[in-house]
Amino acid sequence: MDKRPNARTIDVLIFDGINLLDVAGPVQAFDTARFRGERVYRHRYVSPDGRPVAASCGLTLQPEDALSAASKSSDLLIPGGLGVDLVARDATVLATVRSWAAKTENARLISICSGALILAAAGVLDGQTATTHWSRKPDTERHPDVQWDLDRICTAGAGIYTSAGVTTGIDLALSIIRADCGNASALAVARELVVQLRRTGGQSQYAMHLAGQFQPEDALARLIETVISDPCRDWTMERLADAAGMNSRTLARRFSASMDTTPARFVERVRVDHARGLLADSLPLKRVAAEAGFRDYQRMRRAFRRQVGVDPADYARTFGYRALGTNGGTEHSFDSNS
């Protein structure tokens, strides 16, 4: 990127019961960003009435101003937390959010975690794909006009961004920095924060790596990590059992007890999750299938339909990726505005 990105000021809404990480994570990422040595983002902290608030962890936060649609800032960031439900019933806040969404000066609404429920309550997510923390699924059912996809860690479209919550707020911030300032600036932020540059927006909220880290049985944990690190291996039941150092029947029983699934279904889910990341890099579908361990496109297609409910090409289109056809051509080509 040769042209200097426009400097942006972000109003960060804070309220009683806010999750401090929902604020600190993305704000720190934006604050760290530099383009040719210059800051790109600045922040203003605002509360519904301009008065101090207490985060859910007990820390008192002092805003600079009250939330207002007349703000000169470029973006409004809405974190989540235990206090979201009360804020989502505040008519003044919701009216302000609607006014902010109606701005035409390239303004953006950015929600972290359950902050998306405030956007939904304001009606600005109607007809759009959005995500929020998986635990808030019952609350999303009160907003049927929103296309909720809680298996994604973040979404972007029409100037409105949502994320699954907590650390995924950093992922969303990095994706915005990358779009605004280029890959080098985003990578510098990721290195400074010691985080992964990009977990793709379509990646599942269920982090497969965590499945191994939280297994009390070392043999099962090692097997899980081995499958995740090498999804292309021909993982027959016999090979899985050998890698775990137990017979097939014992492995199936322990897998079911610990993971509530079968070894074969786990392998398939790992491969689908890996394929999601590869689709974000605009690789041909045949190559994605091979590198994810499916061997051919039809096997991957069937797995996607079981795990995600759509074909890989439709998945790519939905998430704004450019997916090349099974013959390496562009019969399945999608741009970021589709």
Image: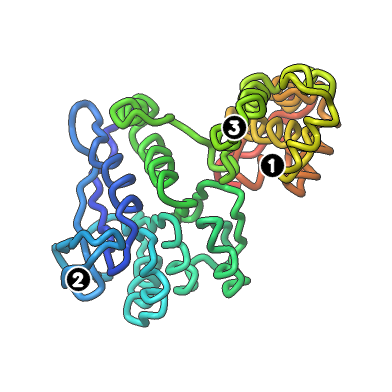
Query: Which residue is depicted at the point 50% across and 35% down?
Result: 199
Q: Which mark is residue 211?
A: none
**Residue located beneath label 3 in the image:** 212
Q: Distance of mark 3 from mark 2, alpha carbons?
A: 45 Å
- Local crowd size for mark 2, using a 10 Å CA cut-off: few (<14), some (14–19), many (≥20): some
Q: Where does the N terminus fall, quadrant-wise?
A: top left
Residue 106: where, in percent of width, then height? 35, 54
The amino acid pointed to by label 3 is Gly
Which residue is under mark 2?
66
Q: Toward the viewer: 108 or 248?
A: 248
Q: Nearer the viewer, mark 3 or mark 2?
A: 3
Which quadrant would residue 159 be assigned to in this image?
bottom left
Query: Between marks 2 and 1, how big is the CA–CA gap?
Result: 47 Å
Q: Classify residue 201 by image quadrant.
A: top right
Residue at horizontal 43 percent and vertical 40 percent from the top: 171
* Amino acid type, callout 1: Met
Q: Earlier in the sequence, mark 3 or mark 2?
A: 2
Q: Nearer the viewer, residue 61 or 42?
A: 61
